[in-house]
Amino acid sequence: MKNDGSLLVKQIGNVTQRNSIIVEYRIKSANEIKQEHINIEELTSVPVQAQISFIDKQGNTWIRVITKKQGITDNQELVEKNASS
C-alpha cells in the first residue's frame, strides 16, 4: 500500500474466468476532505480507478484502466434499495 493508503498492489498469478477479486473502497474522513478544501456538503460522487496490468501467453505486457465516478449518499434506505436491484 502507498503511504496515503490509496494504492493497493496485489500479485495474483494465473487468472481464469472463474477468478474473482473484490476490492472495497472507503472515502476519506471529513477532516481529510476538509484539508483538501473540498466542501463535503456539495460532494455527490468520488472518482474510482483500477489499473490492471498483465502479461499474456506471448509475453506481451498489457494494462487495462477502468475509471468511474461513483455516486455517494447518506440515505441508508436508498442504498439498501439499490443494492438489492
Image (cartoon, rainbow, N blue to C red):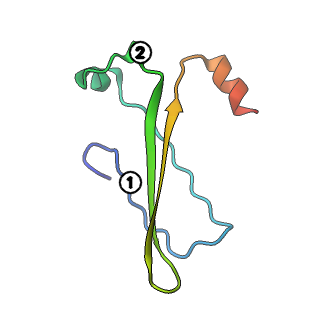
Q: Residues within 10 Å of mark 1 (few under 14, many from 20)?
A: few
The number of callouts visible is 2
Mark number for residue 58?
none
Please report the residue visible at 58 percent of the width from the left and 72 percent of the height from the top. Answer: 15
- The residue pinned by badge 1 equals 8
Task: Tell me the SS state at disc 2.
Answer: helix
Disc 2 residue type (three-letter): Glu
Q: Is residue 62 left or right of residue 85?
A: left
Residue 63 x %, y %: 44, 65
Quarter residue 5 falls in: top left
Please report the residue visible at 44 percent of the width from the left and 32 percent of the height from the top. Answer: 46
- The residue pinned by badge 2 equals 42
Q: Farthest residue in the right direction?
A: 85
Q: Is residue 22 above or below residue 33?
A: below
Please report the residue visible at 42 percent of the width from the left and 31 percent of the height from the top. Answer: 27
Q: Which callout, 1 or 2, points to the residue nearer the camera?
A: 2
Q: Is residue 7 left or right of residue 58?
A: left
Q: Is residue 59 left or right of residue 34?
A: right
Pointer 1 or 2: first along the chain: 1
Residue 2 x %, y %: 28, 51
Disc 1 residue type (three-letter): Leu
Quarter residue 39 falls in: top left
Q: Is residue 3 above or below residue 70?
A: below
Q: Is residue 50 above or below residue 59?
A: above
